Image (cartoon, coloured by chain):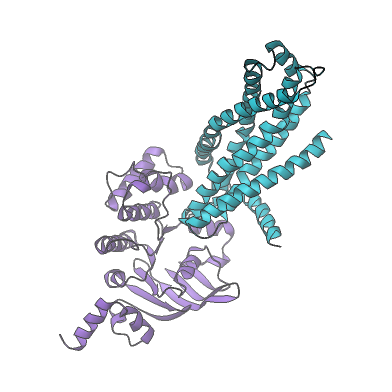
Amino acid sequence: MFYLDDIGRYFLMLKGIFSRMTKGSVLRTLIFKEINDLIIGSLGITVFLAFFIGAVVAIQTALNLTSPIIPKKIIAFASRQSIILEFAPTFISVIMAGKVGSFITSSIGTMRVTEQIDALEVMGINALNYLVFPKIIAMLMYPFVIAIAMFTGILGGYVAGVYGGFISNTEFLTGLREEFVPYHLVYAFIKTFLYSFLLATIPSFHGFYMKGGALEVGKASTSAFVWTTVVIIISNYVLTQLLLS
Amino acid sequence: MIEVKDIHKGFNGEEILKGITTTFERAKTNLIIGTSGSGKTVFLKCLLGLFTPEQGTICYDGSTYSELSEEQQRNLRKQMGMVFQGSALFDSMTVEENVMFPLRMFTRQKKGEMLDRVHTVLDRVNLENANDKLPSEISGGMQKRVAIARAIVTQPKYLFCDEPNSGLDPKTAIVIDNLIKEITEEYDITTVINTHDMNSVMEIGEKIVFLKQGHLEWEGDKTQIFKTDNQAVTDFVYSSNLFKKVRNAQLKGL
């Protein structure tokens, strides 16, 4: 019953976000600020993680190819598939649930604790729209982060595979282009769009409705990370079943 | 003027406000006092429209809040200014941006006009040379001044303050109290202050409402509060050693 109550409140929150819009000129400023905080601020860690994940995937695939009849180009093929289908959209999103999610929960939660949200409501402002809507719009840029993660991950695989002496440059490029299905990119970006919405709204929910003081802000950030990850993993399974089977 | 008639409010089956009826007059500093848990904050939040009373009415200059449409309620709220206990300034905004915030949200003024207004109110609260500072870079007393400036920048008809001098040293607390009183008279607004500070009562208490366990126990002004024989009020007033000593000295004719 407790979880059902939270789920109900989450959907009521979504309704609240899209009602009584904040003044356009104010929203524009807020959206640019959120893009800076949530998107630009996440690029560095995303590039770093994706590069090394790609490199590790390439090395592990190479080390597991012991049979001489399996062509080396499989290393590039496997790296591409795992990075595009899973590592870039899902793995990076789980990490973003920690980085972006805890940032959102703690910033909104602190505003709740310090009565800043009450101040907005007293002024007659729809605090949900003012605080959460710009985050949802900013997170529409999130697929660009994932596109960069895909590119960097494959680059990491190339550097580790070719310069690590596991595969030649020609073989890697041949494997990279082999049996490429453009729909896999569509699938990955559909997932990414859903994750971007979840990454903006679930942590906002935990921050907005938290009660208590500084300790509870920390607890809310932790539970926001856990629940965002759980929902991402479940929706990953559902979407994969729906879109790929 | 705010007229409160028989308001009741409870949470989870427990009644917090048990039928309060009173009036808060315009251009006067009206104080709500009482011990912790007496319902002061719930009462203030009802006056602000943040809580809806289960019974009773609140009239703002003749307009009954519960009879207004949502749009009219929002417009009425725009005529209210609030100074929160912890100031509730927006961390990411400078002092100037904090004060300008209500103007940006609710007016179509040009930036120059807004800045003129912001500088006028910042001057009024005696806050200069702090425009570009963040709330974390200024003292508690200065934060309170910024909060007052933000509350009055749109020239509200009603000003609500929740323990405006909590956490301040006695000297700064008196300055803030007097500032609120001056602004109330100058802007001709209805001010309601929630406090348990007897210094504020003595300094600016033109109308005092004493709450006890959700009831209106007593009301009067700052001279009457020291003469009342209401036990709950005298217990509250003379809970401070200083006031106790002053009273004992008066009784001994010293």
Split into 4 quadrants, where in the image is the C terminus of chain A?
A: top right
Pick the front one: B161 or A157: A157
Name the residue at the right extreme: A245
Task: Pick whichever, B207 or A97, lies toward us.
Answer: A97
User: What residue lies at 77% left-to-right and 39% top-to-bottom?
Assistant: A239
Q: Is residue A239 left or right of residue A91?
A: right
Give B14 or A40, whichever is nearer the viewer. A40
Q: Is residue B20 above or below residue A71?
A: below
- Above or below for B129 versus B29: above
- Quadrant of res B29: bottom left
Q: Is residue B179 left or right of residue B1?
A: left
Residue A20 visible: no
Which chain wears cyan? A
What residue is rendered at 64% in x and 38% in y?
A93
**Residue B72 at x, y percent in the picture:** 54, 58
Q: Is residue B13 left or right of residue B144?
A: right
For the N terminus of chain A, give its image quadrant.
bottom right
Lateral position of residue B113 relative to residue B65, left or right: left
- Hue used for the chain lettered B: purple
State whether residue A199 is above or below residue B58.
above
Picture quadrant where residue B2 is located: bottom left
Q: Is residue B132 visible?
A: yes
Q: Percent x, y for residue B49?
A: 51, 63
Rendered position, B207 above or below A224: below
Residue A162's image quarter?
A: top right
